[in-house]
Amino acid sequence: MTPAPFRPDVLISEVGPRDGLQSVQATMPTPHKFAWIDALHDAGLREIEVCSFVPARLLPQMADAAEVVAHALTKPGWTVMALAPNLRGAQAAMAAGVHKVTLPVSASEAHSLANVRKTTAQMVDEVRAVVALRNNTAPGVHIEVGISTAFGCTLQGEVPEDGVVRLAAALAACGVDEIGLSDTTGMANPAQVRRLFQRVFAEIGERTGAAHMHNTRGLGLANCLAAFDVGVRTFDSSLGGLGGCPYAPGASGNVVTEDLVFMFEAMGVRTGVDITRLIAAREPLRAGLPGEPIYGMTPEAGLPHGWSQHV
Amino acid sequence: MTPAPFRPDVLISEVGPRDGLQSVQATMPTPHKFAWIDALHDAGLREIEVCSFVPARLLPQMADAAEVVAHALTKPGWTVMALAPNLRGAQAAMAAGVHKVTLPVSASEAHSLANVRKTTAQMVDEVRAVVALRNNTAPGVHIEVGISTAFGCTLQGEVPEDGVVRLAAALAACGVDEIGLSDTTGMANPAQVRRLFQRVFAEIGERTGAAHMHNTRGLGLANCLAAFDVGVRTFDSSLGGLGGCPYAPGASGNVVTEDLVFMFEAMGVRTGVDITRLIAAREPLRAGLPGEPIYGMTPEAGLPHGWSQHV
């Protein structure tokens, strides 16, 4: 009898090649991106955000987006995702052949205007147009929205929870497949994470998507744990903690994939990711971005004495 | 009508002056210790581990232990605690006038021998003698044991949970007031923290004491959250993350008090600690240990936009 296929308990969605690379000044050369993406695939990651489709004059780091997608698509068994800030970007992403498009919609008007020069309502309209495009031209593509600044905003301060829940409902009504919550500015706390995800689950059920947490004040893993506790099963993170948001002052530090995988695997929650290979994937990152600081407590401390992982 | 006295929801037990200072090479001069302890009191901390009573030839950093206790006792409204590795140390601590003596008892035999040159069973006997001494000579003194390497050991590897629970029960039977669990080597994970504290609560109830977590692999706050979730209400931490254990290779990084207080206060869990003053207490630490690296994400990132705390 064939053994049942391995099904991880949680999905680690690696955002480094997009979120990380667009946050640093240097541009990683395309062949280095390929090598890094290959190493991430080898480590067992099964979802990856490889680029964003934005004008190259705004983000020269992403000028090779279509090439990068094409390369990632040569690897089997994973979901290749790109970020698009608008309809035009989504069109380019679908044309490049991505499996999944992710759009950022800010719950904070101030952040929305700073990030994409549109109000939140205008972004919902944009998302609706992207869903229509998908339905007409690429029905197999998955549409995800990450609600930015869902837990607070450095520009606006508090972000009312009712507004986040209403926004999630509006996006679900647009036909978005998956709606996650992003702590863009590193302001979330575990109590809030549990409360808000529970409310979103109650509102949109199965369409509730990823927790995208930052480690700005050291709470990244605690917030991921809190999200896991209330049923979240997809987690965004970035190898070496690369990334943040250039338009949210003070925001820094995506959750470190290595530490996140270590936490879950140590808990007996299977990620499907081989942590030794994951740590090895820091090498092509370093090679492609010489001198850029990369983070991670687990790679620095090493795996515990007697550690064994059955991937 | 007089308002009800403020009661924090959790007790933050600052261990920096003991655990931190004994882990660094340099010796903080006594007047600097006084200034640092004063700043910690000003910040609203209500329990502090100020020193350990050990021979000065072993830990010259602690040669002024009795003076430090005497100084800390001049401050009102907090519990002054000292570590003692044995009966002789406990005697000296009580003679110095501490409110509370804490003894480390390792669940790992290998760590116990390396740390105090006694087996675990010999340490339980030592604790029994300390309780008898307390009963006869200083009945008001509180006796705490922190079970070291409760979650794993770098020397021995896995530490069986049954053994930890049995050890907690044996210590409770000795008359110890409070028995906590220490992740001496930074190997704990949140699932294990919940499971083990729940088992210890089931075994010894109200005598269950502090969670002493390390941030070796970045899981310090997640582990504190996990402990809080199952009812732990006392948390050890160290300002600036100073400390570790010199006898457990690879162990480093106490949980950072600043980040721990930030997490709880952001969650609406009251610590009684004023985080702005707490961050200010890093200055006397720096002044007393020039050049020593100190950590903390919250002090680096700053408090969030719009943060307000009602201490």
Image: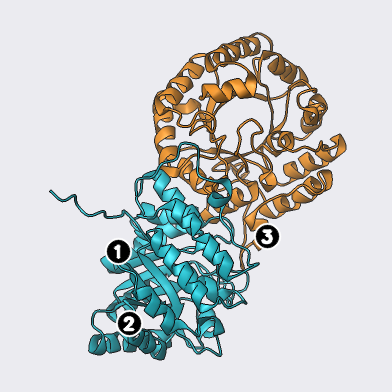
Chain colours: A cyan, B orange
The image quarter containing residue B237 is top right
Residue visible at 52% across and 53% down? B268
Contact flag, marks 1 and 3 (Cβ < 8 Å): no
Q: Secondary structure at mark 2?
A: loop
Name the residue carrying label 2: A97
**Mark 2 crowd level (few <14, some 14–19, many ≥20, 10 Å Cα):** some
- Please tell me which residue lies in front, A72 or B50: A72
Quick check: A289 left or right of A145? Answer: right
Q: Nearer the viewer, mark 1 or mark 2?
A: 2
Residue B12, percent from left and from top:
61, 41
**Mark 3 crowd level (few <14, some 14–19, many ≥20, 10 Å Cα):** few
Residue A221, percent from left and from top:
49, 54
Name the residue carrying label 1: A202
**Mark 1 crowd level (few <14, some 14–19, many ≥20, 10 Å Cα):** few
* Chain letter of disc 3 in the image: B
Q: Secondary structure at mark 1?
A: helix
The image quarter containing residue B120 is top right
Residue B81, percent from left and from top:
68, 28
Count how many numbered circles sit on residues in the image: 3
- What is the three-letter code of the residue carrying label 2? Gly
Label at residue B271: none
Classify A214 as above or below B172. below
Are labels 1 and 2 assigned to the same chain? Answer: yes
Residue visible at 64% across and 34% down? B245
Q: Earlier in the sequence, mark 1 or mark 2?
A: 2
Quick check: B61 left or right of A255? Answer: right
Label at residue B300: 3
- What is the three-letter code of the residue carrying label 1? Ala
